[in-house]
Image (cartoon, helix red, strand yellow):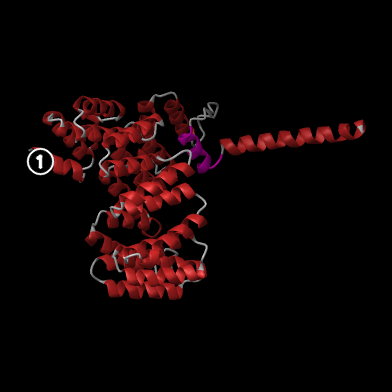
Amino acid sequence: MIYERLGEYTIAIELYEKILIINPKNKQALSGLNRLK
Amino acid sequence: MKKQIADVFPRILLLSTILVVVSFTGRNLSSLKYLRVIYSSSSGLRIFDLPASHPRAALWTANMYYQIGEDQKAIDILERVTSLSDDLNALYFLGVIQKSNGRVFEALNTWAKALDGRILVQFGNQARGVAKQEIAYRLAYNIDPELYSLNYLRFLYRQENNEQFESVILKVIKDYPHSAFQEQWNLLLARYYFFHGNQETAITMYLNLIDMAKSRQKKHEILAELGKIYKMDSRWQEAREIYAQLLKEEPNTPLYSYALGVILFEQGNKFGEADRYFEKFISLSDNKGKAYYMIGKFYYSKYEYGLALANVDKAFKYNSSPLFKWYILLSNIHRDMGDIEKAIKVLIEAKQKNTNLMFVEYKLGLLYLDSERYEDARTSAETILKIMVIPDEKSLKTRQ
């Protein structure tokens, strides 16, 4: 989230994807990816 | 006197020798329980001198390899033992080693084969990932549907897996009519019905359970549960009647006063009635800091920032070792009142107390972004990445 707001989208996407591998239903990561992709 | 001591001493010596011998033989040949204790402990208890013909010699050898860190050798031995016989302890132990090597799903299946629902449930309670929890609880449920259904059901309820939840709960209620879990199953089913469009059935179920309750205490617990779901559904009048009745019967239970305070506040707090109950709640509570925190949190959720701040401040005064969530709440209140600098100050203080560093750092990073301090925000993000353990690609693949 912090990286997303700092404009570092590559790192943010990578982290969101990692979270989704661990927990595929994580809402924050899902909405984060929706915003960025 | 000396003679007496001389008489007694040999007897004590003999007795203690017998005790030592008995306890040692008990240990070596004992029971599954002792085997389990040494598998799960790192106490350094090693018994190497058992004869190779002993029925558990293979397990001891595996245990020895496990304790010196040669996990693969231990696994090889145990896999052989388990392929030759249906030794449940070997299976259990194999599961332990698989888990400690990151082969979690294999471990779960092994424990299921060992018919060990207890460890599966224990694992499910501690596991973070939803997939792991689901498998652990389901396997335990398959081993003994009566004993391990509650954990599985609560999980399904939380995950809103309604179809599966209904089929499992109706099955266990029907299959085990005399089970000691009947009351808990029915309470869970009533709560489910209440929030899934069948409120009348739910309330009838609650009333039946209250009628059937064996003790006064149990009756109150079920009544409080009904009050709680009325509260969750914003049916304030019904909730108020229930808590008023409970408070009449048990005037010294702090949480009933708190619940009434909340309900009266929601109903408009006429004549400051809510405050009276909150004051009663605080005076009855043993942990006054926590009581003030709860009230502060409630006011914050109702956007009453002034009242929230006053209560949380008092909470800090009453408790010298506040929890990290208190700092987060205080910081949130300052942020929402528009004082970001103060909000940051509170979190830095929380950081110094070393409480839940990762979450505090995350909130701090967001506050830095709000106040356009981008470099500080970046430092926070980097700190989080340093603290947290991100699984590498390889272990992520094995999880899948």
Q: Tell me the quarter of the image containing the C terminus of chain A.
A: top left
B75 and B327: which is toward the camera: B327
Query: Residue B175 appears in which quarter of the rendering?
Result: bottom left
Left or right: B327 as drawn, with respect to B30: left
B193 and A37: which is toward the camera: A37
The reply to whether residue B110 is visible in this rendering is no
**Which residue is painted at 31% across and 38% down in the image?**
B104
Left or right: B180 as drawn, with respect to B358: right
Query: Residue B84 appears in which quarter of the rendering?
Result: top left
- Up/down of B213 relative to A26, above or below: below
Amino acid on which the number 1 mark rests in the picture: Arg
Percent coordinates x, y for residue B283 in the rendering: 51, 56
Which residue is denoted by mark 1 in the rendering? A35
Left or right: B323 as drawn, with respect to A30: right
Percent coordinates x, y for residue A2 in the rendering: 20, 33
Circle 1: element type? helix
Percent coordinates x, y for residue B270 in the rendering: 36, 67
The reply to whether residue B231 is visible in this rendering is yes
Magenta includes B281?
A: no
Percent coordinates x, y for residue B251 in the rendering: 51, 66
Magenta stretch secondary structure, dominant: helix
Tell me which segment is drawn in magenta.
B30-41
Give the total of numbered labels. Answer: 1
